[in-house]
Image: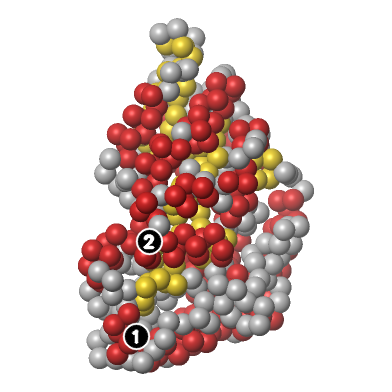
Amino acid sequence: MTISRRTLLGSGAALGLLTACGSNTGRGKDGSTGGKVALGHWYHQYGEPGTEDAVRRYAAAYDRAKVNVQWRPGNYDQQTAAALLTDAGPDVFEVNGPTLDQIQGGQVVDLTSLLDGVKDDFNPAVLAPKTYDGRIWGVPQVVDTQFLYYRKSLLAAAGVRPPATLDQLVDAARALTRDRVKGLFLGNDGGAGVLGGTPLYAAGLSLVTADGAVGFDDPAAARTLGKLHQLYADKSLLLGAPSDWSDPAAFTQGLTAMQWSGLWALPAVLKALGDDFGVLPFPKDGPGGRPSVPVGAYAAAVSARSKHQAEAKAYVKWLWVERADFQEDFALSYGFHIPARLSLARRAAKLREGAAADVVSFVTDHGYAQPLLWTPALQTAYQDALNRIIKDGASADSELRAVVRRAKDELQRVKKH
């Protein structure tokens, strides 16, 4: 969530939020402590045990400034958006972005030079949405991804091969649905909330093209999304599971033969099923299709309101470019993620075998990230249309035509800024 200056000034609640955000920056009045420049570094609250202790340990190891870590529970995006409009916000902050509003509004600092000589070693899929106008505005920290888990024994018993195309996925889900087991779990809403643009990329399309145009103004888009409704109509989808797609419980407890979930679930799946599972990208569709896996990454950014921008940039470079040991530790010791650096992902012991190695290959070969120009308004319009297509059997062609019209107007608007 982002807050515009107009909204902020007109909101008493947001004004109170500013007071709360600015009450503890970790800096003295002169911006220094103990003879060193003091930097405030904000993180959102992670669910994985040990993460907070780890980031505080990293900060304590930095000897060129005094880094004060703030661990921010609650609505982190809202807190950060408000604080960036004041002088009391962080110098360095973790961000699921930066967003287009933050970049166009001059709220973040150009970090392009920090990746000099190593840019090609960062996963290009996650670096792309951190890049705007040819400059890099955030340094990716780790890569998270989603993909398809399948139960080897259940597929073998049904005589089903791991699906390589969307048509094969539809057929496999139907064949695997028997007794109390459903063929596929894409979330309790049938997949509209989690799949997003993944089926479009599997059809060889995109949400936004490289030159900023609508990427799915093509008949292939409707054909592909219509197949998601077939899964629903066949009653092959698990709906109403005790927990949603991000939790692998439905898969490990045998409620479904295949499930869409994330890399974070892999250790739990491995513990529960041993070697009785495999992983797949979302399968390609049509002659121009390609396998598809969505990726995302939190990034470290520097506030344009910081009084110590040079020192903040130096610290970000040290932590997320130079300290490979900390980057690997952050990715794999607390939860399960992929380092943003390709070289680290290749050499990390936990990612070199089995399903984990397969996932790294998927991300490298087929990963895509939601484009920076794909705004929350467009995300809502597209997801609403996808929900109607999947669950109601609405015409994919008609629904997408409406979203394409909306997208053309919205992309034209944001590119004018």
Which is more foreground, mark 1 or mark 2? 2
- At horizontal 40% and vertical 36% (from top left) the residue drawn is 326
List x then y, in percent, for residue 185: 37, 76
| 382 in relation to 116, above or below | below
List x then y, in percent, for residue 310: 59, 22
- At horizontal 67% and vertical 62% (from top left) the residue drawn is 208
Foreground of the two, 417 or 142: 142
Find the distance from the CA under tag 1 to the CA under tag 2: 22 Å
Figure quadrant of the C terminus: top right
Residue 365 in view, yes or no:
yes
Instruction: Please report whichever mark, 1 or 2, sits nearer to the chain's N-terminal start.
Output: 1
List x then y, in percent, for residue 231: 45, 85
* 153 left or right, relative to 234: left
Foreground of the two, 328 or 403: 328
List x then y, in percent, for residue 93: 48, 34
Task: Tell me the amino acid under the disc marked 2.
Answer: Glu
- At horizontal 28% and vertical 71% (from top left) the residue drawn is 275
Task: Tell me the amino acid under the disc marked 1.
Answer: Leu
Number of marks? 2
**Label 2: few (<14), some (14–19) or many (≥20) C-alpha neighbours in 10 Å:** few
* 201 left or right, relative to 243: right
Which residue bears the numbered disc 2?
353
Which residue bears the numbered disc 1?
155
- At horizontal 61% and vertical 37% (from top left) the residue drawn is 115
Tag 1's secondary structure? Answer: helix
Residue 187 in view, yes or no:
no
